[in-house]
């Protein structure tokens, strides 16, 4: 039934008045936003593909029926990689995509929303974010910066990284120049490592030219793509330093508040979807990449010696105890570690036992 015919047959004055009200026929408000990221252009998982920054922007557009359109800029296309936080905080752009531990210099507590050395795997981290109050704490930490944060991806357990020599003991770490971000960098610094933070795009040239001796990035697929196997041959596991690295979506609070409630929920839903898609992508692609580098590029896969891991565990405990000087960091750390202690009991019974004895 077309409108004119309906109005004619509806007849009653009240119905006509309601239908003629301007709001009923108003075109929904639409938004043209920009998202900056900390990632090199074209990088699968982070910048392009399912669960990435561009993947997330595409899903928000699809889910909102085109009411929100987001143009995504890789690192340096609009702002430098580590300018992402400020660009969104100042409202230069509406959205940013990165990892929270990059912003430790802004607010120390940010690190807990990226990953914690010897912390929880993606299942545990997600349990804390969604069901253990993690997201609310994250919002509290970012509130002074005018940012609304949310998880939107996880790499899964990362690789220890690339080394130009074997690590047989704690002493072999002394004097190494290593690219590694976050709390893990602080832990290694206590063991004599010279820690350097570089964005992804700058790791390969630094490792190849000997500016650094070692570097961690993500996992086999991403590391192969950066060509790190051409610059160092010893590839260590497992990821004590990043057992679940969560990608973050940050939205300018001002831009967020300008949205209708349904669009806010679409963004939250799309970010949660990206969180699932991202780790699914990582789990589906890492095995082949690792196999390829070992078979075809002479990469030596090594497990960190047990005594090195134990030393790292002790030092991590010390660094975490000392690091939480401000009340907010202490609050987040307490929440995370209490949740982990409880979650670990169940994970030991379920996941760990399954992987060790059954699979
Ligand atoms: Ca990493």
Image (tube, rainbow, N blue to C red):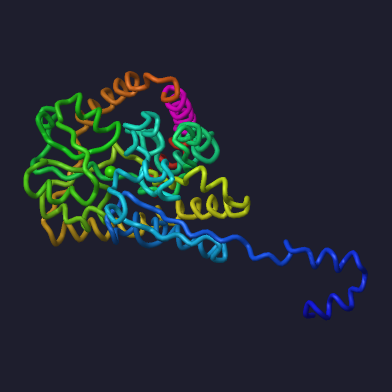
- Percent position (x, y) of residue 195? 18, 33
Q: Which residues are magenta?
A: 330-345
- Percent position (x, y) of residue 178? 16, 38
Residue at position x 12%, y 59% in the image: 297
Magenta stretch contains residue 88: no
View extreme (right): residue: 12
Magenta span: predominant SS is helix
Residue at position x 11%, y 34% in the image: 176
Residue at position x 62%, y 52% in the image: 260
In the image: residue 299, left or right of residue 276:
left
Q: Is residue 6 above or below residue 191?
A: below
Q: Is residue 192 above or below residue 122?
A: above
Most foreground residue, 116 or 207: 207
Q: How many marks?
A: 0
- Percent position (x, y) of residue 274? 46, 54
In terms of image quarters, where does ligand 1 lie?
A: top left
Most foreground residue, 106 or 249: 106
Asked if residue 345 shows in the view, the reply is no
In the image: residue 270, left or right of residue 42:
right
């Amino acid at each position: 039934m077309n409108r004119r015919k309906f109005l004619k047959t509806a007849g009653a004055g009240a119905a006509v008045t309601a239908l003629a009200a301007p709001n009923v026929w108003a075109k929904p408000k639409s938004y043209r936003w920009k998202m900056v990221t900390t990632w090199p252009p074209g990088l699968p998982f982070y910048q392009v593909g399912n669960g990435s920054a561009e993947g997330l922007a595409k899903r928000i557009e699809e889910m909102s029926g085109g009411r929100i359109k987001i143009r995504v800029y890789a690192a340096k296309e609009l702002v430098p990689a580590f300018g992402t936080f400020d660009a969104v905080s100042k409202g230069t752009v509406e959205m940013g995509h990165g990892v929270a531990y990059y912003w430790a210099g802004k607010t120390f507590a940010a690190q807990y929303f990226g990953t914690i050395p010897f912390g929880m795997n993606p299942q545990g981290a997600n349990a804390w974010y969604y069901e253990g109050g993690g997201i609310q704490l994250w919002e509290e930490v970012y509130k002074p910066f005018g940012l609304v944060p949310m998880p939107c991806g996880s790499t899964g357990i990362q690789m220890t990284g690339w080394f130009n020599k074997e690590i047989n003991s704690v002493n072999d770490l002394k004097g190494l120049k290593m690219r590694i971000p976050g709390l893990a960098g602080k832990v290694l610094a206590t063991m004599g490592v010279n820690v350097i933070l570089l964005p992804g795009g700058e790791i390969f040239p630094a490792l190849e030219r000997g500016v650094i001796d070692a570097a961690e990035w993500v996992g086999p697929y991403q590391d192969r793509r950066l060509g790190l196997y051409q610059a160092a041959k010893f590839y260590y596991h497992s990821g004590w330093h990043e057992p679940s690295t969560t990608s973050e979506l940050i939205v300018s609070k001002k831009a967020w508040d300008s949205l209708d409630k349904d669009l806010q929920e679409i963004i939250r839903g799309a970010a949660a979807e990206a969180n699932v898609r991202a780790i699914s992508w990582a789990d589906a692609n890492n095995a082949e990449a690792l196999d390829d580098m070992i078979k075809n590029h002479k990469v030596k896969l090594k497990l960190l010696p047990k005594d090195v891991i134990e030393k790292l565990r002790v030092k991590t405990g010390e660094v975490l105890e000392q690091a939480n000087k401000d009340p907010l960091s202490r609050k987040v750390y307490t929440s995370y570690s209490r949740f982990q202690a409880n979650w670990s009991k169940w994970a030991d019974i379920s996941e760990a036992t399954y992987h060790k004895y059954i699979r």
